[in-house]
Image (spheres, grey):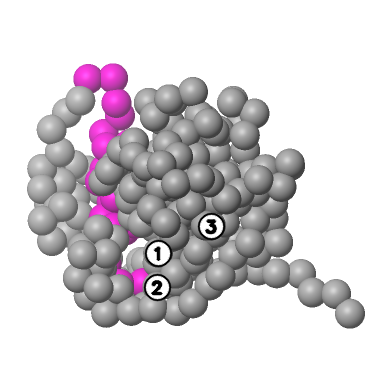
Amino acid sequence: MNFIRPIEKEPGTPLYEQVERRLREAICGAAFAPDTAIPTERELAEGFGVSRITIRKALAQLEEDGLLLRRQGSGTFVAPDRNRIQKSLSRITSFSEDMRARGLEPGSEWIGKTPGTVTPEEALALGLSPGAAIYRFSRVRYANAMPMAVECSTVPAFCLPGIEAVGCSLYEAMERHGQRPTKALQRLRAVALDDERAKQLAVPPGTPALLIERRGYARSGAAIEITTSWYRGDAYDFLSELGE
Ligand code: 16G
């Protein structure tokens, strides 16, 4: 387990916080399958080069955050639902909002951020004329250190003041420009991740995922977003409210 190595003291950060951060990254990343036992307090203390009291304090915090479960007499285990996100299928929320609602810090790693002109398919989907300017965004989306989704979005250029206006959140940037989608149509299907997507999501190739295609509309009815997302199947619970 290569995340267990001596902690180098960072001035101003308590040791237990550094241990906690290292363990959190390992638990939320691909180091442990859910429900597996983590090393004992003694092993962790030796590996990190800190006292058992420091380890206990870090573990207590991770337990409180729902990432670890202690089982009397048998050890400490990675919680089976350590990072499951409850996602509503009836509200139009952004990835960043979904993560914050779960107390997680949203993050993005850019794969691509390019201006261009519409393809014939995009022109039809967005109701744009041939040659219209668009922006394309591809990102791996993170919750703390854990990759959760890969997203590729196409947005008409008039929805943003410029391509660099998009920082962590696409919807925040569109909202600032008065162009956030207020309605959307979505299509969902189960897929097995290909090598490239699996690598981006730090899971083995073939891992199940949900492919979600969203077409977002402005209040005026104009289509202003096409996004294809690959959501980790082991990270989400999808909820929808049904009427009679
Ligand atoms: C969600 C949306 C996606 C949107 C993104 C904006 C689904 C299935 N997809 O992931 O269409 O582009 O949020 O998130 O919910 P952001 O504002 O954090 O960039």
Q: x%, y% of residue 1?
A: 13, 61
Q: Are marks 2 and 3 in contact (CB under 8 Å)?
A: no
Q: In the picture, which quadrant includes the C terminus?
A: bottom right
Crowd rating for badge 3 (residues with CA inside 10 Å; few <14, some 14–19, many 20+): some
**Residue sitting at x 65%, y 68%:** 239
Residue at image mark 2: 209
Q: Earlier in the sequence, mark 2 or mark 1?
A: 2
Left or right? Give the position of 23 relative to 61: left
Q: Are marks 2 and 1 in contact (CB under 8 Å)?
A: yes
| 3 or 1: mark nearer the eye | 3
Q: Residue furthest top?
A: 12
Residue at image mark 1: 230
Q: x%, y% of residue 96?
A: 51, 43
**Residue sitting at x 57%, y 50%:** 127
Q: Earlier in the sequence, mark 2 or mark 3?
A: 3
Residue 210 in view here: yes
Q: Earlier in the sequence, mark 3 or mark 1?
A: 3
Crowd rating for badge 1 (residues with CA inside 10 Å; few <14, some 14–19, many 20+): many
Q: Nearer the viewer, residue 4 or 146?
A: 146
**Residue sitting at x 49%, y 40%:** 156
Crowd rating for badge 2 (residues with CA inside 10 Å; few <14, some 14–19, many 20+): many
Magenta segment boundaries in residue numbering: 11-34
Q: Amino acid at mark 2?
A: Ala
Element assignment for label 2 = strand
Q: Amino acid at mark 1?
A: Trp
Q: Is residue 53 above or below residue 185?
A: above
| 2 or 3: mark nearer the eye | 3
Element assignment for label 1 = strand
Residue at image mark 3: 125
Element assignment for label 3 = helix
Q: Amino acid at mark 3?
A: Ala
